[in-house]
Amino acid sequence: GYSRQWWKEAVVYQIYPRSFQDSNGDGIGDLNGITSRLDYLQKLGINVIWLSPHFDSPNADNGYDIRDYRKVMTEFGTMADFDRMLAGIKQRHMRLIIDLVVNHTSDEHRWFQESRKSRTNPYRDYYIWRDGRPNPSAPHGFDPPNNYPSYFSGSAWQWDDTTKQFYLHLFAVKQPDLNWENPKVRQEVYSLMRFWLDKGVDGFRMDVIPLISKIPGLPDLSPEQLKDPSKVWANGPRRDEFLQEMNREVLSKYDDMSVGEAIGIGLAETHNIVGEDRHELSEIFNFDATRIGAKGGYEYAPLNLPDLKAIYSAHARVLGKQDWDTVFLGNHDMSRVVSRWGDVSTPENRALSAKMLQTMVLTLRGTAYLYQGDELGMTNYPWTKISEFNDIEVQNRFKTDVASGRMTEQQLIQGAAAYGRDNSRTPMQWDTTKNAGFSSGTKTWQPVNPNYTTINAASQVNDPDSIYSFNRQMIALRHSDPAFVYGDYQDLDPKHQQVFIYTRTLGSAKYLVVLNFSKQPVEYSLPGGSAAGQLKLGNYRDTSDAPGSSTLHLRPWESRVYRQ
Ligand code: TEU
Ligand code: CA
């Protein structure tokens, strides 16, 4: 059996506040901007908003470096604005989860400011400080304590001259890792979680949460481990203990949801975190699907459909009924899904492929996540110069990889243009007015994609054939039957290169989903000669095949959901 929960049935919409809606003309999205767009989200039919970090931050990593967990980022507004936004969300029967970034803080956080003052400061042990390895020819006479690389390139250790030790930062230099071994740190985190839950937020998306437990003694990684350090780092021995403590002390006291960004967690370990008997988190993001074909850096092989199917089948096989899953194809760390896996060669194909991909997200097992703008079919930006990129990852790679001759500037631009994080961070395209209606100011913090004149919300909200309207219908269809949420999943043709076809079954309710993952038309005979059934929703206005037919004539990027 399974337990029904609001967060399993929810469709979650991620807002990247900096890029959603600017209300005061400074070119930066803000909370009042979000409040002004709540009707748009309610109409779409989503249930939960996941807000990327809205806390006080010097923005070395756009808010994923927090200076004060109890203060709203000045550019985003005030606590009163937050309260108004939250009230508006609740009035519309939606919920809000916020981003909990507690593997690290900003180096401008008061704790770190204290910590770096002296080796005996009461906050010293809030962070991870180590002696260097003596090396007379190294700068300052020391090599870093071990060979950990930072996710944003270079060493994960930073020398601090005041106390002549290094501190650990798995991400940017300005993001020192917290020391979760220190019980005081954990109590500080639980306290700030209660602060926001008591305000009425409905839970958290937890940034890189498996990384909070470090490997004892911090030994060097072997050459093999260096190929994917996340796998090692995500499995620190106290990870589950810490999450269970957090659950016991905080989460279990609220009707909340929690979703862990679980980089490095393989499918086999997933139960340990999300199993209902484990009392840790509601669900986690698993990146196997979105990292298909990843070759390191900004290099990816083109999508091979059977590989994607194999991942979802593995999820169905390995995860039990008590292990909740998530489905997503985009977020603020990825390129735009329609540019990545869809087809932006013509407006028709873009619309069709965007609808097809959203059909998949909204019919697989797991809480469904949509990233802002994907409901409009927003695309990657036409980047041409390094200076156009804001992302610290691109800027760091420029310093390390291009300077060292590992790649040319042109290669880095090409890679970051195709797969870089800034693609999903260009402003929302609301209408055809100045700055796509995102901002009345003279300059926006990220450039607006010039295609806003044709891709924007205003032209789609009232058009029944638009990508937005399709998403709305698809979300409504998902909500109309628990089979889409809880039903068993079966892949009917795992090897087919072009067609993805599966069923979702719960009791007597059975749905057949057919997706043509290519621009080539295909004549497809249903396995066993069975009949397709009643068409509930497709991405073409008409269908050429009768309900009884067992041969389907699928057009480019066609998607169909049948009730059988
Ligand atoms: O991301 C964690 C993470 O490891 C990746 O998604 C990473 O950003 C990516 O590999 C770089 O291309 C989370 C946040 O989602 C991300 O925005 C932050 O930068 C990061 O943590 C640090 O807080
Ligand atoms: Ca603003």
Image (tube, helix red, strand yellow):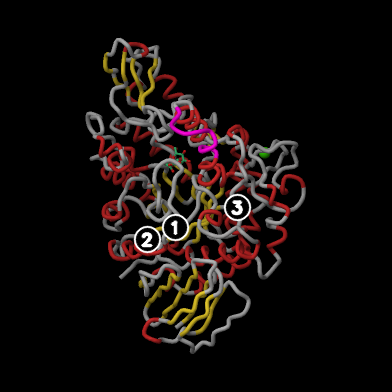
Quadrant where the image shows the N terminus = bottom left
The answer to whether 353 is drawn above or below residue 378 in the figure is below
Q: Residue at x 41, y 60 (%)?
A: 304
Distance (Cα) linking label 2 and label 3: 24 Å
Image vertical order of residue 313 relative to residue 28, above or below: below
Q: Which mark is residue 379?
A: 3
Q: Secondary structure at mark 2?
A: helix
Q: Residues within 10 Å of mark 2 (few under 14, many from 20)?
A: some
Q: Secondary structure at mark 1?
A: loop
Residue projecting furthest to the bottom: 548
Q: Earlier in the sequence, mark 2 or mark 3?
A: 2
Nearest the eye: 18 or 225 = 225
Specify few, some or many for label 1: CA neighbours under 10 Å numbering under 14, 14-19, or 20 or more. Answer: some
Left or right of residue 80, residue 220 in this image: left
Disc on res. 307: 2
Quarter of the figure that contains the C terminus = bottom left
158 lies above or below 94: above
Give me the residue at 67% from left, 44% from top. 448
Disc 1 residue type? Leu
Counting from the top left corner in percent of width and height, residue 247 is at 33, 47
Left/right of residue 329 with respect to residue 382 in the rendered view: left
Res. 39 image quadrant: bottom right
Image: 117 above or below 112: above
Distance of mark 1 from mark 3, alpha carbons?
17 Å
Q: Earlier in the sequence, mark 1 or mark 3?
A: 1
* Region of the chain picked out in magenta, as a range: 405-413
- Residue depth check, mark 1 versus mark 3: number of the one nearer the observer: 1
Circles 2, 1 touching at the beta carbon (< 8 Å): yes
Instruction: Report the residue at 37% width, 73% height from top.
Output: 493
Marks 2/1: CA distance? Answer: 8 Å
Q: Which residue is mark 1?
A: 303
